[in-house]
Amino acid sequence: MAVLCFAAYIMPVRWDMTDDKHYSLSETSKTLLRSTDTPIEVSMLLDGDLNAGFRRLKKAAEETIEEMDVYANLSLTLLSGEEIKLADSLGLSPIVIHEREQNGKTAQTTVYPYAIMTYKGKRAVVTLLKNTRGLSGEENLNASIEQLEFAFMEALHLLTQQKTPRVAILEGHGEPDEAHTYDLMTALSKYFQVDRGSIVNDGMSATASLNDELINVHILDGYQAILILAPQTAFSDAERFIIDQYLMRGGAVLWALNGVQLSEEILQKDGFTPIIPLDLGLTDLLFRYGVRINPALVQDIQCLPIPVDVSSDAEHPNFQPMPWTYAPLLLTSQGSPITKNMGQVMSTFVSPIDAVGGEDGIEKRILLATSTASRITATPGEVNLSDMNPDMSEFKYQYVPVAVSLEGVFSSAYAHRMVPEGVMTDEPVRKTGVPTRQVVIASGSIVINELQKNQPLPMGYDRYSGMQFSNRDMIVNAILWLTDAEGLIALREKDVALRLLNDKRSHDERLKIQLISTICPVAILALIGGMVFVVRKRKYEYNSER
C-alpha cells in the first residue's frame, strides 16, 4: 500500500468517471497548454454573493482551470471589491440579476462573468456567461459551462499566436460597402487582419499580379479564407477559375449569396416588386462542390414584424406591427460547432439550398433552417407588401435548409476545361484539391448591418423590435471554423448534461425532502451500527461459551 501511495504521489493519475467527461480536456487543449513556456495568470471576476446557478458556473470555471494547470503552469486569482475596477478599465459590462426570494421580494445582484488571462505581458478577456436569447437561465448557464474549455482555449490561442492570420472580403461585384459590413470587420479584427479588394482590379496588393493585363492565379494564396458577401453582378470566368484553384490549394470560402434579384426601393415605393433569378455565374462551381442555391424565396410564419400603416386616413397614419414572412427567424443546428447553443438568426429574402452529389465524400451539415411552417415562392414572381395575412394551409414545408457547411476534398469545376483567358499561371489545372472547408449561406442579409443616423448597428439587430439575434456569433464562428487548423472550434461541441430540479415538486414536498435527507442518513447509520453491535455481541458470546 505504501508503494502504491508513493507511486500515485510521483506519478498522479486522473480518471474521469463522469458520463459527459466533464473533468477532461481534449487533446487539442492539452497540446496548446503544453506549448506554453511561461506561467499563465488567470484573474476571475466572478466572485461575491452569487446565487446557486452562478456558484455552479464559478465552480465549473475553477475546475477547468485546475485541469488546465495539470498541463501548464497556471495561477488563479479571485478578484473582488476594489480589484473589480479592473473590469471597468477594460470596458467589461456587469450583468444585473433579478431574483425573487422566498418572502416574495425581488433581490438584485450585479456580477462580472469574466476571467482575464495574462501570458507574456499580453491580456485576453474570457467571457464565462453565454447569454443566448430564447434560452432559460438554467439552459444559458449549462451552455456556458459546456463552452468553458473553448472560451479559455480560444483566449490562450490568441495570446500564443505568433502571426495574425489574414482573411479577405472580395469586392468588385456590387457587394455591401464598408459601412454595411463594419460590424463584421470589427468582430473579425479580434482574430484576423481583414483586407478588402477586387481580384480583377488588382485590389489584393499583398499578392498582386506583376502584369496589369493578367491576373496571377496565386493572388489569393496569402489568405486563410475569403468572404464573398452578397454580390450583385456576375463573376468572370477568370475570377471563377482563381477562386476554384484557391480552393483546390486548401483555401476556405464563405459564400453569402442571394438567390434572387429584387428592388427593395421599388418595394417600399410601390408596395410590390418583381423577383427574378440572380445569375452570378457561380452555380456550376457550387454544384460541383455539393450544393445548389435555388432561385426562389422562402417564407416562414416564424418571422420578424414590420410596421404597417393600417389607417384609411392618410393624414392620420396608424402603424401596427404585422408579420413579414419574407424575414424569417432562422433556427440554428445543434449538430455543428458553428451554431451549437446559439439562438435564432435574423434574415430577409432567403433562398432554399439543396445538397447535391451524395456520393462525393463531402461532409455536409445544415447550419440554418426555417421553422415547421414555411412555403417557397418561385421565380419569376413578385413580393407584395399586401401579403401580410397569408393562407396558413400553404405553409407546408418544414426545416428548409438555407445555410450549410461543407468539408472534405473537393473536385475542381475546371477539371476538364482550359485555363481561362486573362489568368497568368505556369502550372496545370488542379483537378482535385486537399481537405478544406466551405460555408454557403443563401442570403446576404445575414452578414449585413443596418445604419441608423449613418452609424452602423450590430449584425442581427432589429431596429423595430429592439431585439438582438445571433447573426454576429454565427458568422464569426463560421469563419473561425473555416480557418481552424488546430481543431479548437470543435470544443464547442462538448456536452454537459443539464440535470434540473422540479421546482414545483421541490416546493410542494419541501418538508418531506428535508426529513428524508436528514433522518434517513442517521437511520441508516444507526441500523448499520446496530447490526455491527449484534454481530459482535453474538461473536464474543459464542467465543466465551467455548
Image (cartoon, rainbow, N blue to C red):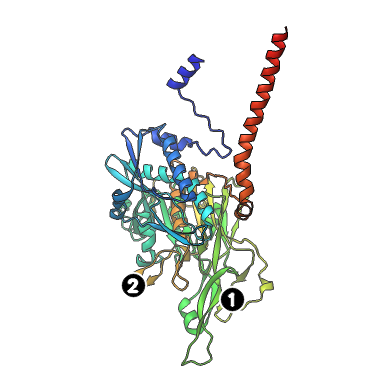
Q: Earlier in the sequence, mark 1 or mark 2?
A: 1
Q: Residue at image x 30%, y 53%?
A: 90
**x and y percent of residue 25 in the render?**
48, 37
Q: Is there a contact, CB below 8 Å, between mark 1 and mark 2?
A: no
**Element under label 2?**
loop
Q: Is residue 416 above or below residue 382?
A: above
Residue 158 lies in what quarter of the image? top left
In the rendered view, would you say 508 is above or below 146? below
Q: Position of residue 481 (x, y in %)?
A: 46, 48
- Name the foreground residue: 191 vs 239: 191
Residue appearing at x 62%, y 39% in the figure? 519
For marks 1 and 2, give the CA distance. 33 Å
Q: Position of residue 174 (x, y in %)?
A: 41, 68
Mark yes or no: residue 391 visible: yes
Give the labeled residue for mark 1.
381
- Left or right position of 538 against 280: right
Q: Which is nearer the eye, 135 or 406? A: 135
Q: Disc 1 marks which amino acid?
A: Gly
CA neighbours of label 2 inside 10 A, class few (<14), some (14 to 19), many (20+): few
Image coordinates of residue 101 in percent, x first then y, are 50, 58
Q: Is residue 410 visible?
A: no
SS class of the residue under badge 1?
Answer: strand
Q: How many marks?
A: 2
Q: Quadrant of the C terminus?
A: top right
Q: Which residue is mark 2?
A: 454
The three-letter code of the residue at mark 2 reads Asn
Give the residue at x 51% y 45%. 432
Q: Quadrant of residue 456?
A: bottom left
Q: Which residue is more in the foreground, 354 or 9? A: 9
Quadrant location of residue 451? bottom left
